Image: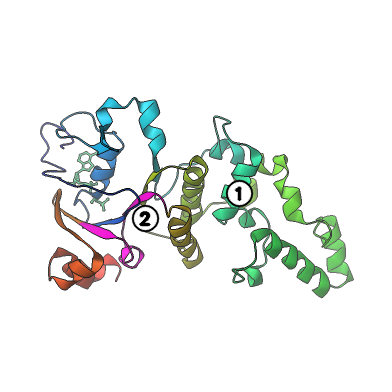
Amino acid sequence: MKYGVHHGYALKNINLAISAGEKIGIVGRTGAGKSSLAKVLFRLIHENISGSISIDGQDISEFGVGDYRPRLGMIPQESSLFGGSIRNNLDPLHQFDIEEMWAALIKCGLAKHMLSYHSSFNDHDNMTDHQKEEACVREQWNNAGWLKRLVMVVLNRVPSASSLADIRKPHGLDKSIQDCFGRLTSGQKQLFGLCRVIMRKRKIVVLDEATANVDLETDKSVQALISTEFSDCTVLTIAHRLDTIMNSDRIIVMDKGTIAEIGTPRELLAKDGVFAQLVKTSDFGQ
Ligand SMILES: Nc1ncnc2c1ncn2[C@@H]1O[C@H](COP(=O)(O)OP(=O)(O)OP(=O)(O)O)[C@@H](O)[C@H]1O
């Protein structure tokens, strides 16, 4: 594949079979061809390309776009979001019901950001987000003096009337992203991308791992979601950090547009090849 007749090959001699459900990490230096591989998979390149890609044994060029795109989900580094409500950003075609949207928002950890949230309950993994929110409101109420309680009443944050229940009403989704989040962090933008893919239940998911400005908590939730929500899916992670893909079934090492190495992390570490070199270089985030 070339980006133009006068360009060199961005991808060449790629011969690759990925099994359903496999978790694949794709690594390589800048310009190695990782994004190009994703672009051809999503059929974003139509010219200067030869060869074929099949999904479930069927050449993707034979699929209509309407049949093809719904099989794949892309989670970009920073999902594009537009002004307007959370609902419109998640479901511009009005295909989903409110419960489906809330379920995805809760899974991605975005629902709790839509409320002022008490961090001391974040570590209680055995509690649902709803229970955490209720416990948080109860604790705040118990510790509050009369003035703070008065403020909580005004803000409708009293234990018996969970503010999560309030924000779960349809109008909560009709709030603008700006109103709920202020300025979104890069990590939150990626979580919105995750949310969209979870709602749409894609079987093949390409995750372009965020490179910058992702806080530890967001990073952990993205990784946890990939392993739980996408456990049955085929996941291709374009990785910019090694630790996130060390549990992959296989790692593809791209170099100058070709697959330089492919194998389990253990196999690749055992031979002193490109992957082992990447591990050693400090510019790879290790
Ligand atoms: N739109 C484009 N037009 C022309 N050349 C491009 C274009 N996009 C990528 N390339 C070139 O194709 C090659 C592969 O780039 P690609 O973006 O796939 O690499 P990458 O491994 O994803 O890099 P990075 O980690 O920096 O995103 C590079 O030589 C790059 O300069």
Give the quarter of the figure containing the C terminus: bottom left
Q: Is residue 263 left or right of residue 197?
A: left
Identify whether 102 is placed above or below 123.
Answer: above
Q: Which is nearer the eye, 104 or 83?
A: 104
Residue 191 covered by magenta stretch:
no
Residue at (48% x, 53% y) in the render: 229
Which class describes the residues within 10 Å of circle 1: few (<14), some (14-19), or many (20+)?
A: some
What residue is pinned by disc 1? 103
Residue 234 covered by magenta stretch:
yes
Q: Is residue 96 left or right of residue 144?
A: left
What residue is pinned by disc 2? 209
Q: Residue furthest front?
A: 57
Of marks 2 and 1, the one in the foreground: 1
Q: Is residue 159 left or right of residue 276?
A: right
- Give the secondary structure at mark 2: loop
Part of the protein shown in magenta: 232-252
Q: Amino acid at mark 2?
A: Glu
